[in-house]
Amino acid sequence: MAGGPSTPELVAAVSNEGGLGMLGAGYLAPDAIRSAIKSIRALTDHPFGVNLFVPDPAPDAEHVAQSLTRARELLAPLAEELGVALPAELPLMDFDAQAAVLLEEKVPVVSVTFGVISARWVAAFQYIGTVVIGTASTVAEAKAIEDGGADFVVAQGAEAGAHRATFLAPVARSLIGTMALVPMIVDALTVPVIASGGIMDGRGVAAAHMLGAVGTQLGTAFLATPESGAPAPHKAAVLTATEESTGVTRVYSGRAARGVINRFARELESHEAELPPYPLHNALTREIRAAAARAGNPDLMSLFMGQGTRLATDLPAAHVFRRIVRETIDLLDAT
């Protein structure tokens, strides 16, 4: 939910109903993270969490230079069509500076994606009572996160929208469905597991509970709500997409992510191997995607979402949350 959809209003709406609202802060500068945290605290006195992206290992410099040149060639026609320029500089986020804000603000829950958070940060967060969560798409990744000291592990199934959490095996071999992944990770770990991927209603939450998960993580279910910061074309796409609309591709950001396969994806998919890695490609394509959103052009946006879109709604987040809780209780009481 980083990059726009995640807002203080959405976080607070979920937390105020008894859930754990999560701020997707992977793309926010430290000052913006601090400001968002203050906004959340002005809207709720309940616990909430913040998610960050663990930096990938530094790629080969020569490969990066060649791939950036090629990507600029491929993206130039799209940028020209939208009347924007590709950025000359590619500013990247400083994970340590972001994490320092979460520590200073004593955020109740910190979750990370794309890798294992370093031992020094785990120790620092846990020392002040902050709960640490890691995200895994395979059992091996889940074990690595547990060994790294995390308190919980999110099991991210292949159905999940946006970026894949994968950081050990190739993505093509890490697309394990939620139904298969959750019980395997539950059996392999001693720490509690949170299920994620394709869960949109009480049926999904109840099923995850039966598989051994202690909680569930939902994103697409809240993507079209009024509190979501997703642009209007993105919300409209969520409400009209089917289970056949999305695919996993790295053409938007340089990292595998699930989203609608639109014109942007179709024009670049044959060149996927030539593109630079995340986060460089993400920074390179950002203005194109932002300009497309401003123009109301979904064909050139990154329409990240999961596979459960037929179950999506544009009702307020509190209504969605209450309905899911009611459905879950009814189903578990009936077992």
Image: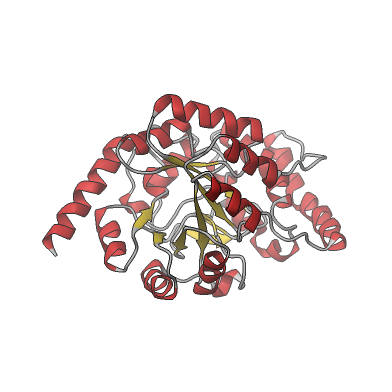
Q: Position of residue 144 (x, y in %)?
A: 57, 69
- Position of the C terminus, as image quadrant, is bottom left
Give how far across and how far down residue 196 sits, in percent. 41, 58
> Residue furthest toward the top?
42
Taking the spot 82% from the left edge, 40% from the top edge, the residue there is 88
- Left or right: residue 134 compared with residue 199: right
Residue 50 falls left or right of residue 284:
left
Instruction: Determine whether 228 is above or below 253 in the image.
Output: above
Q: Nearer the viewer, residue 145 or 136?
A: 145
Q: Is residue 35 above or below residue 180?
A: above
Rendered image coloring scheme = secondary structure
Q: Is residue 176 visible?
A: yes
Residue 225, above or below 272: above
**x and y percentages locating residue 251 in the rendered image:** 65, 56
Q: What residue is rendered at 58% in x and 44% in y?
A: 301
Q: Is residue 315 visible?
A: no
Using residue 44 as the reference point, say whether residue 164 is left or right of it.
right
Taking depth in this image into account, of 112 and 311 the one nearest to the observer is: 112
